[in-house]
Image (cartoon, grey):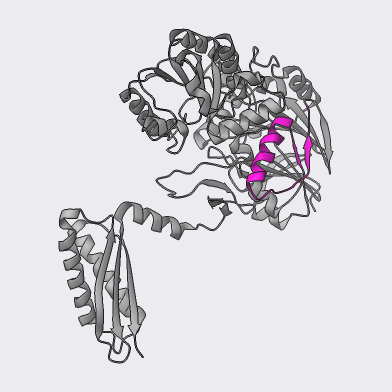
Amino acid sequence: MSKNLRISFLGGLGEIGKNMTVFEFGDDIIVVDVGLAFPDPDKMPGIDMVVQDITYLIRNKDKVKGYIITHGHEDHIGGLPFALKEVPAPIYASRMTLGLIEHKLREHSGLKVKAVAVRPRAVVKIGAFSVEFIHVNHSIPGSFALAITTPLGTVFHSGDLKIDLTPVDGQPIDLARIGEIGRRGVSLMLCESTNIEREGFTMSETTVGERLEELFEQYKSKRLFITSFASNVHRMQQILDLAQKYKRKVTFLGRSMVAVSDIAIKLGEMKARPENIIEISKLSAFKNEEILVLLTGSQGEPNAALSRMANGEFSQINLGPDDAVIFSASPIAGNEGAVADVVNNLIHRGCEVVYERLAAVHVSGHACQEELKIIHALVRPRNFIPIHGEYKMLKKHCEMAKRMGMPARNVFMADLGECWELSASGLKKVGSVPHGSRLIDGYGAGDVDSSVLRDRQALAEDGICVVGLGYDGKTGDLVSGPDVIMKGLAYAHELEKVIIDIRGVVLESLSKMPFNGNDINEVRNQIRKDVQNYFQKNFNRRPIVVSMLEKVGQ
């Protein structure tokens, strides 16, 4: 049993999302954040989300004393239902974050777990760890940085943060407390790197409210539709305030938008007059200038309310020239094409559309370079490891730390699965732990492997051909078929010819390897191979080929 502090990274390094860091001292483990990542649909067809491989936690489940959650975004809480099923332990987080987690757990068969709500500057003793929760600004209420203290010293974990001196809720980041912790001494800082490539400062959330008011005035005779991230409660609060000022009723649309707004209002994180919130079924009773719809779909998600409206597939609302649609969110990397499709479809329907390139209707929740410099200057860590970002971001963050005067020997680039040890003599890498990704298909975890993904990609790209036939169990003679069914392989005008060709290919396969005297699996493989070769030669495609051989009689 090591008497040093061990830190293992199971997510969030070299990638966006899936954040998870494991702290271990003696017989005690705490886990900071259990997030998910969203899959690339081209590389992971049919996969809903990606979470961590938690083999290391399962092997040490008796040591796990708690999950410390910095805030309620999916890349920090999305993996919790899957981790808690295998490694249950108490959760420590803000009331807002716990509200979102409890809602998520109800969706997963009502999983029960002990939850401890903490306030800013609260200090919680968990085994060998003392964890202080420090208020920071981010794009969701109840966000914390952490000061994790052990007998070996203090680790400062930034969570996700920005420095907003004029926040919507009137509570700026607690720079004073961060500075006090820095003066007390910080052995190691783990700091987010999301916006390290952006110079300057991140703009205040209140600047978005000012621009939104201009748009309320500009489109005061139209129905207003505003799409944003459902978790951006401060953005929603500004929109609700403007709706009240301009005497518009508000409808929330989209499962996550409805859920987050309900939780935020219940917990007092968002204020709204009940008489100003109406159901979608009541919209027809109001004039255009009295209507505001706050909805999901800012990332071009195909099943989101806005996407369906843009495609004319939303029965309760028909968009047109009387409507203005405002995108109050930036496209996440990889979503630009989907967002552009929705924008174009809305414009084609006659809507006025405002999006980021046309107006400043979104600001980031992450610190840019100058803010990160302030955090470094306040914390003054002896050692530094950047987290939460792709490798290029992590490297740039290391370079900035060194430019600020940190010795190169105290600045480290870590990688997924690595285990680092903090001792009285310093910080060093000491090995690795099991790590990787689990693919979530529906509500199941870990049941989709690489072969399944390859099959899905082949189906999507090259289609499928099913060949069915029956043979006499005694003589081996063909008694039915070959029957051919194809999906995604041939245009209608050439379908009949291709089917005739494939029947000929199958009969030729049987002449080379008849049923009688040959292993049935060898016959099946021969048919599959010859049919695939036909498609490769004639269409330059390699579809999935399924040969179904049925024995008739004995």
Q: Quadrant of residue 248?
A: top right
Please tell me whether residue 342 belongs to the stretch shown in magenta: no
Residue 149 at what x, y percent from top left?
80, 35
Tally of numbered tags:
0
Q: Residue at x 47, y 11 (%)?
A: 215
Q: Position of residue 508 (x, y in %)?
A: 19, 77
Specify whether 415 is left or right of 493.
Answer: right
Is residue 142 in view?
A: no
Q: Quadrant of the C terminus?
A: bottom left
Q: Residue at x 51, y 28 (%)?
A: 281
The magenta-colored residue range is: 91-119
Is 311 on the left or on the right of 432, as rendered?
left
Vertical position of residue 295 compared to residue 79: above or below: above
Asked whether 252 or 416 is in front, the reply is 252
Residue in front for this viewpoint, 190 or 488: 488
The foreground one among 319 and 281 is 281
Q: Residue at x 22, y 74 (%)?
A: 506
Does 344 sit left or right of 324 as displayed? Answer: left
Asked if the magenta segment contains residue 99, the reply would be yes
Residue 68 vertical placement versus 284 (above, below): below
Q: Quadrant of residue 407?
A: top right
* Residue 246 in sight in this render: yes
Residue 320 location in percent, x, y? 36, 22
Q: Residue 28's spot in the image, x, y percent?
A: 80, 48
